[in-house]
Amino acid sequence: MAVPVSEPASRVRPVSARHFVRLKLRVMGNNFRGQSWRAALFVIGSLIGLWIAIGAFFGLAAPGLAGEGRYALLVAAFAGGLTVLGWLLLPLVFFGVDETLDPARFALLPLSRRTLVTGLFAAALVSVPTIAVLVALSGLVVTAGVLGGWVAATVGALGVLSGLFLCVAAARAVTSAFATMLRSRRVRDLAAVLLAVAAALLGPLQIAGLAAIQDTDWDRLSGVATVIGWTPLGAPWTAGIDVAQGRAWAAAPKLLITAVTIAALLAWWSRSLESAMVGAASTGPARGKPQVSGGAVAQLFPRVTGRLRRNRFGALVARDARYWWRDARRRANLITIAVVGLFVPVMVNLGGQGFTLDSEQGFSLTGDTSPLLVSLSMLFVGLLAAMTLANQFGFDGSAYAANVIAGVPGRLELQARMVAFSLYVLPMLAVVAVVMALILGEPTWIGFMAGTLVATYGAGLAVNSFVSVFGAYSLPETSNPFAMNSGAGVTKSLLALLAMVATAAAAVPAVVAAALLGDAWLWLGLPLGVGYGVGAALLGGYLAGDALDRRQPELLSTVTPRR
Amino acid sequence: MTGEHPALALRGLAKRFDDKIAVAGVDLDVPAGSFYGLLGPNGAGKTTTLSMAVGLLRPNAGSAWVLGHDVWANPVEAKRLFGVMPDGVRLFDRLNGAELLAYHGLLRGMDPAVVDQRAAELLDVLALADAGRTLVVDYSAGMKKKIGLACALLHGPRLLVLDEPFEAVDPVSAALIRDILQRYVAGGGTVVFSSHVMEVVQRLCSHVAILAGGTIKRVGTLEEVRGARSLEEVFVEVVGGRTATGQELSWLSR
């Protein structure tokens, strides 16, 4: 009767990281089963990634192969630093993280946190991007080896490996922490600010890049490289080069810096992981406010929709507009657009100039930018904004069934979604145009900047309507807005690339006009750009709507997550 | 005109997923005004069949007719006539109950004033009015079923297709749902629902079909299918189950 409460756990075989890796590979394999096109996309994407990686490999090995030792540290510090920053920021801004192994699934298993974190970390290491980065940055090992022999090569290899670990740990820790923050209503706004800061880091990156191109002062650059080499950004990558160049004493502390950083990141990750696991069980207290005002229809329509007709179209717009705010995944996308949309143009147009002036005559905002450069940066913003809709049906998941059952016509569906999204995006684009004009001190440029923005955005809506109908994929039903299904990352990148190229091509007239028309474009830009954008969006919705009518059930099954 | 047509007619519906045949040719006639139970064990193809019948999943072969309208050839007409509560499909659950009903009503082309009035009534009857502004995602399982039913009923369809309406519903809510459905049928509507709860089917249905392994095994009125036995006996016999003999799982007792 009296069962001992704490029976010694006998013969429990320890769970090692190996199990997690095998589980991940098995899940990935099963996801591709019977979906040959997805497997094919995965293979193609992987090959492209590998091809780029091999190119980068030779680029990084070049200082060694060419015997140009003085560039070695520079290349290692900048390339390595950019890689770490990329791993840190890109998952937040563009790609999300592969969550083949959803931490919440392990919540009920008797696993210690240490086992779980090491296991998930090991599983995260098994992915195409990590392999690509490993291949690319192995070039540094070659450089170290050629310049300094076997010892340097060994230290270099150790450095590159630990650097890769650092990248993966950083990506996991940051996305997990942000996911936790975006879930909680109280710190949601704080998370938005932090994301802004993260995106602002793109700025220094731009500055460094532009400065490197403009500045032929190698001494100062290598000074910067030396400093970067002592931060976690550059420490792992430069250790091997240091040994090769006779600074063997520096290798050990640099590897130590890396190890400490990895440990700290993993500890951080493990803390937010716990809340992610618990958070999946309960999404927090109900936000019920007992009093209800107005009828059902009045409640559905948010204030931003104004006096929209209370009909089918209005309902679609109102629902989608509510979703852009209430769905954490969509909201994260909106925040990204707002932040990147502001920072990138500012940095592109001021970045290089501001930096070089910085050292000589203090900080000054007199970038000598051209309408062409401004147009290009506006094109990027419009493109980025429209790209958010590339998987608009994936956001809905199986809930899209409601629209299929109601038999919503495809054109109506796509137009309503464009309008709802534009309710948020157009004001943002207006702010971008105004802020840019103020910063550049060229108030007359507002017109053509806004025109270019709207033209690109409209063309992007058209292109992405097609992408969303034909290239939809399901998103996992987790609470992490950055989570991606396995394999979807590659698909997403390919589709995004395709959509970006198509959108850019469709928006080329705006840039050409900026280059050719000269001053006339300052005045014609706004009406022509808006006309072009609206026309493109309408045409895209019209054509893609027909396609949607024909494949509603197929679209529903592609966006329904498999359980 | 629709009097002579069955409320729902399936002809040779078949669906194959990769190498697995989920539904292997289902023929079914649901008479108008009937309360039709589609019985079957887990994985029998109930959800697949119903999804194909309402236009959510394209069949590999066969056709589905709702009151004389082909669901796949003429979806607009057919979809106007039925209401659906799918199972395992999310609602637009970042809306609250009233917003969700308003969305469904307007999507069906209803007049806003009618939507308001019916939504208030449905929320009241289904005891969801207290939930107020609570988002549907935060509803309990039973409340989600009820709001799903409300969405399907809102536009006053002639045919209701419900997938597992009594799954994960507590007895109080189940009784409420039963009452509403019985009233709906008494008022001339037709209900088709899938279930594997014998007790509910036996109490509610006028007609029953037993689906197993993707084909219809038994079909007819409740009396025809059941005969002198209980429905559960017939079901287990048709489906063919096994019971634990006591030899296995000895480690469960200590």
Image (cartoon, coloured by chain):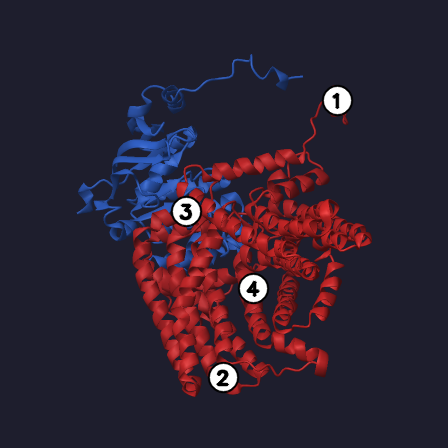
Chain colours: A red, B blue
Check disc 4 and report the residue beneath it: A336
Image depth: mark 1 or mark 3 in front: 3
Residue displayed at 62% across by 68% down: A209
Check disc 2 and report the residue beneath it: A445
Residue A558 numbered tag: 3
> Regarding mark 3 in the picture, which secondary structure is present there?
helix
Q: Are marks 2 and 3 in contact (CB under 8 Å)?
A: no
What amino acid is labelled 3 in the image?
Thr
Q: Are marks 2 and 4 in contact (CB under 8 Å)?
A: no
Distance between the alpha carbons at the discs numbered 2 and 3: 44 Å
Precedes in sequence: disc 2 or disc 3? 2
Residue A365, percent from left and from top: 63, 82
Both marks 3 and 4 on one chain: yes
Distance between the alpha carbons at the discs numbered 2 and 1: 80 Å
Q: Are marks 3 and 4 in contact (CB under 8 Å)?
A: no
What amino acid is labelled 4 in the image?
Thr
Question: What is the chain letter for disc 1?
Answer: A
What amino acid is labelled 1 in the image?
Val
Precedes in sequence: disc 1 or disc 3? 1
Q: In this view, does A542 lie above or below B81?
A: below
Q: Pointer 1: residues within 10 angstroms few (<14), some, or many (20+)?
A: few
Precedes in sequence: disc 4 or disc 1? 1
What amino acid is labelled 2 in the image?
Trp
Both marks 2 and 4 on one chain: yes
Check disc 1 and report the residue beneath it: A3
Precedes in sequence: disc 2 or disc 1? 1
